[in-house]
Image: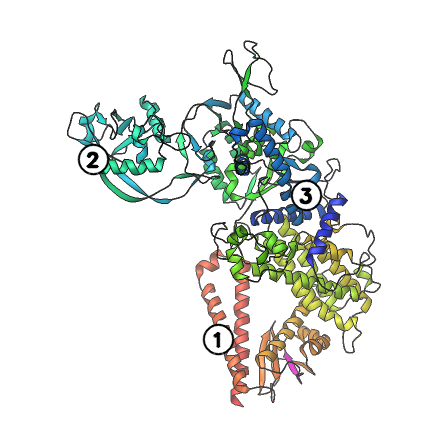
Amino acid sequence: MELSKSYEPADLEARWAQRWLDSGAFTADPDSGKPPFVIVIPPPNVTGSLHMGHALTNTIQDMMCRFRRMRQHEVLWLPGTDHAGIATQMVVEREIARDGLTRQELGRDAFIERVWAWKEQYGGRIRLQTQRMGASVDWSRERFTMDPGLSRAVREVFVTLHEQGLVYRDDRLVNWDPVSHTVLSDLEVEQEEEDGFLWHIAYPVVGTDERLVVATTRPETLLGDTAVAIHPDDERYRHLHGLHVALPLTDRTIPIVCDPEAADPTFGSGAVKVTPAHDFNDFETGRRNGLPSLQVIDLSARMNDNCPERFRGLDRYEARKRIVAELRELGLLVQEQPYRFTPGRSQRSGAIVEPLSVGKQWYVRMKPLAEPAIEAVRDGRIRFLPEHWEKTYFHWMENIRDWCISRQLWWGHRVPAWTCDSCGHLMVERHDPTACSACGHTVLHQDEDVLDTWFSSGLWPFSTLGWPDRTPDLRTFYPTSVMETGFDIIFFWVARMIMFGMHFMEDVPFRTVFLHAMVRDRNGQKMSKTKGNVIDPLHLIDGMKPDQLTEREREMSQQLLAEFPDGLEPQGADALRFTLAMYAAAGRDIKLDVSRVEGYRAFINKLWNATRFVLMNLEDARVERFEPAALTLSPADRWILDKLHEATAQTTEHLEQFRFSDAAHTMYTFVWHHFCDWYIELSKPILYNAEGDFPGERASTQAVMAHVLDQVLRLLHPFIPFVTEELWAALPQRTGRDELLAVADWPDAATIPTDAATSASIDTLIAVITGVRRVRAESAVPPGRDLPQVMLLSDRAETRAALDQMAGYIRRLARVEAIVTGTTDTERPSQAGTAVEAGVEIVVPLEGLIDVEAEIARIEQAIDKANTDIGFFEKKLNNPKFVANAKPEIVAQDRAKLAAAQEKRATLLAGLARLKDQ
């Protein structure tokens, strides 16, 4: 296969995505006997499309799976989507509203048909976009939370929990979304401080001239008050025990009740209004004191018929304005002060939720489920990465409350409960009943509600594998290996999966929970449509042309358009993936700078060009037959193999420890700096049979170059799978040419020869060449002009011998005519540039080549830098606490750095003196 001259991602990524799909390479075999590695992908909402959070998730999980697959694990990466009850129903309701219809007008069955049709039409977007990112998932096992098998699992869990007394019904206050018209769990209510007011209202005490002052952020609920509570030990109000107050704006009187849990004498006036129908704390106060519950706000957040007539039908906030105005007119509004408060908002609709009683709801008793799940994390059967999230998990689980799981929606898993129209008997059944189990009557009515989406999602690790049947998949692939997801759904999803897994499978659902950070814009702001700072991954992968954006896309991408007014060229999925991998340090939010994606596309382009160079110079070298013992290796060959050994060991360890950023950095450094910048350059004289002293053999260098490239492509494959498959397929004379890199073996560091001494010598060579080049540049020596001579001075005989052996490299790569090695006692010319690298003093005679004053300035600047370094390390090492508490190897490293900086300063001072004395 011949590579094109330039790297163009669009064509090759589409080709390989289809090739992988056709090959079945990612289809897991439960009977293979290989150690399993399993990830069930967090199912994105079927309403959704790829956003940057999905891109990060796909990248991290695919790195894990490709790495483990090449390590010869039986990898199952199971994909799927969530039916997303509220979100999907809202989308389809908006769709039918364009036709002038409501779901009520359509009827339940017809509406559900419309939702399924919408799901079939749009639900495939996630699949296509997941493929676009190169995700190596097993599409043969794709699941949807309302598939028949998963629906069966949901019913089995509900019925079993009901039989065990862990699912029950109760009539209590719930979080009501007046826009979506459904109950919400506490986790679906977002709490964020907002500016508001605190109104202080006087309630006249019946039969006296006194007034009790209460404070509230919700004066509209005053109409539903059924008591005022005081502390029984509050001396200010002891004489009011047993009295009543006149409820303002109504003709009702309500009692003054003594309740030490409701009223705090040290806070405010010490008196609080009690509205059991519209406040969770007041609901409990009402129960303790036997108070009636008077609901004054309806399901659409309007004032109902329990209010005085003038307020009926008003929106709650319009009613608030009128109530405050009337209280002011009556002289009952004591104070109105600005106040920061925290209203609960629906996560989906954004509406402020209303605490309401809407009839009996279904609940899960959580404490019995939470206790084993807490223990599983505490004893290490499940570990969190980063570990600090364990504290958050424990805090929530130890204070967990019962979970309201019924939702007043039509789209979702319908509650499997039926009521007999004749005798009222309630039945919870695994199969739809045809007759009442109590009286035999055949007219049964199924519960109208559906289950919270997170109820079915909580079963994901085992319902997707065929439970409640004991399938081969379930036996082999449960527990799963890693749950990789965002920290924001620890409670929504992770905790519930652990509880359900422990209860129904009697084992943890996964061994490791890896919580990735949030992808923010380059300024650290959360991406949101309203801020206009959204970055669509497909705009980076496929390019962005401003004139082709919809108005909505332009609004969402204002920041990107401001930075790139002419649009973006396609960067490809690999460039985006590598960028996210480089950013993906555990626990650290990602500030995504688009220019970094362009930079890593340049890295891939460099790899592409390096591969083309290697292929053009391989001739008959055979990639699969690398036998270093049979080769005549040059020092550069030994060096690159030593660096490859180090990079392989480090990358493997980093990936095993979920340090994706460290792994990506290791490979970036090896490929860009070691392989491309230096090894290829050091190899050219041997490949081109250049004259001079270049130890080595052409065929051996070809073999090493081919082998290193082969290993590099394997090591980079989890990060940039598309381009590595393309380049690997181009390697010549490889056996099994139809084999995919995706299933090839992972490199083994133990098989790669090391040579620490030669590697150190080449490191010194590179440092010297770099130092000579820097002196040239800083001394303004014309780039096209060769230096007549360079002196390399060291008191280490082995260093001088190595430099003599590799003098040809220095002459060629630093553009030097003559190399002179010597000790530090060697006499230096007066006009010379000086540098110290790797313990070697580099003296570049500059007479006739430079501006002496400019060179003096350069050396003085280098001395200032050395002084700064010396001061820094002296301060650290003179700190007894640092020396006592730091790791010994760190202290030793800092002492070595101090000595090197002191030696460098001494050399520079000597060079400066020579220039000034001439």
Is disc 3 surrounded by few (<14), some (14 to 19) or many (20+) residues within 10 Å? many
Q: Position of residue 360 (x, y in %)?
A: 45, 23
Could you say which is closer to the camera, residue 279 or residue 230? 279
Q: Is residue 518 magenta?
A: no
The CA distance from mark 2 to mark 1 is 78 Å
Residue shown at 31% from the left, 31% from the top? 311
Q: Which residue is mark 3?
A: 137
Q: Quadrant of residue 842?
A: bottom right
Closer to the N terminus: mark 3 or mark 2? 3
Closer to the N terminus: mark 2 or mark 1? 2
Q: How is the image coloured?
A: rainbow
Q: Are marks 3 and 1 in contact (CB under 8 Å)?
A: no
Q: Amino acid at mark 1?
A: Asp
Residue shown at 54% from the left, 67% from the top? 897
Give the structural element (helix, strand or loop) at label 3.
loop
Which mark is in front, 3 or 1?
3
Q: Position of residue 181 (x, y in %)?
A: 46, 32
Q: Position of residue 587 (x, y in %)?
A: 52, 49
Q: Which residue is mark 1?
A: 864
The magenta region covers 781-792
Could you say which is closer to the camera, residue 896 or residue 125? 125
Q: Answer above or below: position of 444 versus 629.
A: above
Q: State left or right for residue 442 relative to residue 677.
A: left
Give the structural element (helix, strand or loop) at label 1.
helix
Q: Amino acid at mark 3?
A: Val
Q: Quadrant of residue 299?
A: top left
Q: Amino acid at mark 2?
A: Leu
Q: Quadrant of the N terminus?
A: bottom right
Q: Which residue is mark 2?
A: 330
